[in-house]
Amino acid sequence: MWLASATASRGIARQIQAATARVHDLVRAVKGFTFMDREDAPEDVDIARGLSDTVAMLESKRSAKRAEMRVEATADLPLVYGFGSQINQVWAVLLDNAIDAVAQRGSVVVTARVHADSVVEVADDGSGIAVEHRPRIFSPFFTTKPVGEGAGLGLHQARRIVHLHRGDIDFTSRPGRTEFRVRLPVNGAATPRVEPVQEG
């Protein structure tokens, strides 16, 4: 009896320790994602860290769908100059949409690399974007989600943020693979200064 009680207590202690670690990781991710107390001026932004924090923020949604989501960032990924929380909003929109697009146990893969600019690609293995919807995909208030599940502003706002950071965003889509590509200028003396995105 004593042995069983001691074993159960150790098991509960391990569960509490694991839960505490998860809460700590989530709090760290929230702070990193929002750039708490650091949004008054643009700064050097670590894209890989931002992607990691965004993935952590969406872990519950990914887990509920049993989807695979992984980030592959090259070790030499340079910093970009801008507003980190706004750039993270771009990753949140793209990853959230990708999770919505895949079936149960689907796959979302994020790659981050440098090729003149920093390039981030978010790919999913969902059914793809219908041809007739593609010209309007970045239009405000356009959504293919059911009523009440989307305002149609996510991709529109994401494009605004990317453009105000002197970058570009585009996509390709076919059944089984949709890929959004974001290009942001790498940090350097010639990097133009950017202004924060105003809501609305």
Image (cartoon, rainbow, N blue to C red):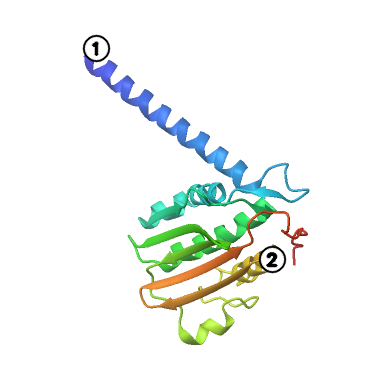
Q: Residue at x 22, y 14 (%)?
A: 3
Quadrant position of residue 138? bottom right
Q: Answer with left or right where residue 137 lies relative to residue 2.
A: right
Alpha carbons under labels 1 and 2: distance apart: 66 Å
178 relative position to 4: left or right: right
- Tell me the element at label 1: helix
Q: Is residue 98 above or below residue 176?
A: above
- In which image quadrant can residue 151 be found? bottom right
Q: SS of the residue at dot 2?
A: loop
Residue at the spot of label 2: 166
Q: Which mark is residue 2?
A: 1
Q: In this view of the protein, which residue sits in the foreground, 121 or 102?
A: 121
Name the quadrant of the C terminus: bottom right
Say which of 98 and 2 sits in front: 98
Q: Amino acid at mark 2?
A: Arg
Are there few (<14), some (14-19), or many (20+) residues within 10 Å of tag 2?
some
Position of residue 169 relative to residue 2, above or below, is below
First in sequence: mark 1 vs mark 2 = 1
- The percent coordinates of residue 94 (x first, y second) are 53, 63
| Location of the N terminus (image quadrant) | top left
Going 55% across and 43% down the picture, which residue do you hit? 29
Compared with 15, 60 (above or below) is below
Answer few, some or many: residues within 10 Å of disc 1's Cα (few below 14, many 20 plus, some between 14 and 19): few
Q: Residue at x 57, y 69 (%)?
A: 150
Q: Residue at x 41, y 31 (%)?
A: 18
**Residue 25 at what x, y percent from top left?**
50, 37
Task: Identify the mark at residue 149; answer none if there is no mark.
Answer: none
Name the residue type under label 1. Answer: Trp
